[in-house]
Image: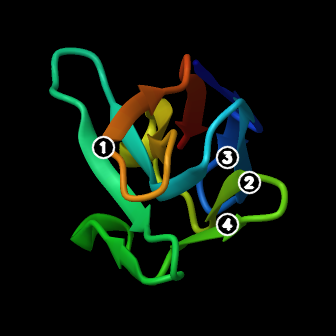
């Protein structure tokens, strides 16, 4: 089993910054894709940013130029630097990871427990 533990959420004023972290722990062979999603009340969970094991990134249009996803493979950790935050960014942010237990084996998906980000106007 893999556990994803998030940290870094909180309350910030519009225009401010936050940095989310998500550390994976457990016994596994490798972590493939890592990502951040967000979900606000009454809406479906949506992808914010994705990073592959090779460092290729992709972002939702709404956060391009403001958010940066990165990862430290040695620490099995993914980060989300969020700048110029807007009230519309308010949501619960979830960490995601796809994991292999053996080389070339199937991928298993895991989610963190979520961390609240609230941006006040």
Helix, strand or loop at mark 4: strand
| Residue 85 x/y as whole percent | 55, 58
In the image, residue 104 above or below residue 45: below
Asked if residue 118 lies left or right of residue 34, the reply is: right
Q: Which residue is mark 3?
A: 13
Q: Nearer the viewer, mark 1 or mark 4?
A: 1
Residue at point 24%, 72% (across, down) = 61
Task: Write down the residue under mark 1.
Answer: 106
Q: Which residue position holds label 2?
A: 19
Residue 50 screen position, x and y as percent? 39, 63
Compared to residue 50, the image places residue 39 above or below, namely above
Image depth: mark 3 or mark 1 in front: 1
Name which of mark 2 and mark 1 comes first in the sequence. 2
Asked which quadrant contains residue 24, the reply is top right
Q: Secondary structure at mark 3?
A: strand
Taking depth in this image into account, of 112 and 108 the one nearest to the observer is 108
> For the residues carrying marks 4 and 2, which lies nearer the camera in this image?
4
């Amino acid at each position: 089993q893999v556990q994803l533990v998030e940290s870094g959420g909180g309350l910030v004023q519009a225009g401010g910054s936050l940095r989310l972290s998500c550390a994976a722990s457990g016994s596994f062979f490798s972590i493939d894709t890592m990502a951040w999603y967000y979900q606000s009340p009454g809406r479906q969970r949506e992808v914010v940013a994705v990073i592959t094991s090779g460092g290729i990134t992709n972002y939702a249009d709404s956060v391009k130029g403001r958010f940066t996803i990165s990862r430290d493979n040695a620490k099995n950790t993914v980060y989300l630097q969020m700048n110029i935050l807007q009230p519309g960014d308010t949501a619960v942010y979830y960490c995601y990871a796809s994991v292999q237990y053996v080389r070339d084996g199937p991928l298993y998906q895991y989610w963190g427990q979520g961390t609240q980000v609230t941006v006040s106007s």
